[in-house]
Amino acid sequence: MSNPAQSDLRITSFAGVLAALPAMIGFTPYNSIVTVLLAADASRKTFVSTVIRSDASDGGAPAADIAAAASRHGVVAVILVAVADARHTVVSLQGVDRIGHHLREVGIDVLCALHTFELTAGAVFRDLDTADGGVVPDPASSEVTVSQVFSGRAIDSDCSVVEHRFEEGDEIPESVGLRAAAILGDVFLAATFEELAATVYAREIPSEAIVSRVGITLSGSPLDVRDAYLRLAIYGEQRALEVMTHIARGLRGTARAQALTIARYFAYLGGDGAAAGIAFDAARRAADSVGTDVPSLTGLLDRALRAGFEPKNLRELIPIAETVEMSTGATLTG
């Protein structure tokens, strides 16, 4: 689930909606079903509230969750889009039908259902209800794309690019962090938090020492220490996501699962549902690799995504500075 937050931009045609989808999602979807949820403000101006992407191979499996999320958040109508090649078209269209059925059952109108083989300039699309068709404009020229690029948010060529960011990188040995712990002694935890906060604020790449030190704090510390990392969101969700994703690449096992969970939280706050979902899968694999359960926060975020919670509703999980100081000894600015 992605929250494009583009209510100030006008999209005046279904072709325009198709061209804007890569920017709304964060990557160009292939073999996917995309549900565009529309809400209305006090003046009855309709805007894109949320975009939900699911795999075409899942068909209508997410239908009930999508309908439940839409009904809870004042959605007035939806646009359904199947982006599927010839091999996946049948199952994707069946999924569109099932999702549409569930939405209508909860009183939400389906404005249209569209199908295209791909979201590239010049690709042909058709309306599944009227059989009318058209041509997809160049997604790179969409106003939504331009706005996202200027805001600093990446639009990737496909889902695999996002998945790659959450893959394991070169492992940073725990011994690197233990050497720092021996030198810093009692201030190890506080110093680690303060240096990491400075790294996020400056949008720098964490050093190997910081990666290893964060891993140590995530491996066996109480939950209030893990939750203290959520405070990094005050420096910008995207900055915090980039840094924590980099850290997760150098960790393994429990520490990696915890880092990915924190990264997922930042992605969710920033409205990047695609990255949030992929981070969840990576966290689950990391936990499975050492025979442990996924972190409890991962389960909470998974339920939030399925329920269609607005990111702002989870901002209350960000601890105040005094709480972080009590649990870690760190004094964070902001």
Image (cartoon, grey):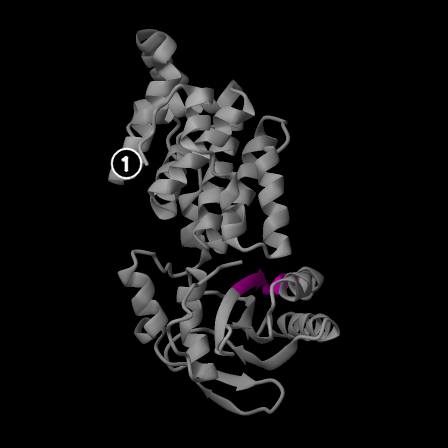
Q: Nearer the viewer, residue 109 or 89?
A: 109
Q: Nearer the viewer, residue 99 or 38?
A: 38
Residue 287 in the figure: left or right of residue 30? right
User: Considering the image in quadrants, where does the C terminus appear?
Assistant: top left
Q: Which residues are magenta?
A: 51-58
Residue 184 in the figure: left or right of residue 16? left
Residue 244 in magenta stretch? no
Residue most toward the right?
105
Q: Residue at x 31, y 32 (%)?
A: 333
Q: Residue at x 69, y 66 (%)?
A: 60
Residue 57 makes an appearance in the image: yes
* Residue 98, above or below 327: below
Residue 84 makes an appearance in the image: no
Could you say where residue 267 lies in the image, as x and y percent from the top left?
45, 48
Q: How many marks?
A: 1
Could you say where residue 121 lies in the image, as x and y percent from the top left?
37, 78
Please tell me in which quadrant of the rendered image residue 110 appears. bottom right
Residue most toward the front?
42
Could you say where residue 330 lies in the image, as x and y percent from the top left?
37, 22
Mark 1, residues whose alpha carbon is within 10 Å: few (<14), some, or many (≥20)? Answer: some
Secondary structure at badge 1 equals loop
Q: Main secondary structure of the magenta part?
A: strand
* Residue 27, above or below 305: below
Please tell me in which quadrant of the rendered image residue 23 appears. bottom left
Q: Where does label 1 land, which residue?
A: 205
Q: Nearer the viewer, residue 180 or 232?
A: 232
Q: Amino acid at mark 1?
A: Ile
Q: Nearer the viewer, residue 178 or 232?
A: 232
Could you say where residue 262 lies in the image, as x and y percent from the top left?
48, 37
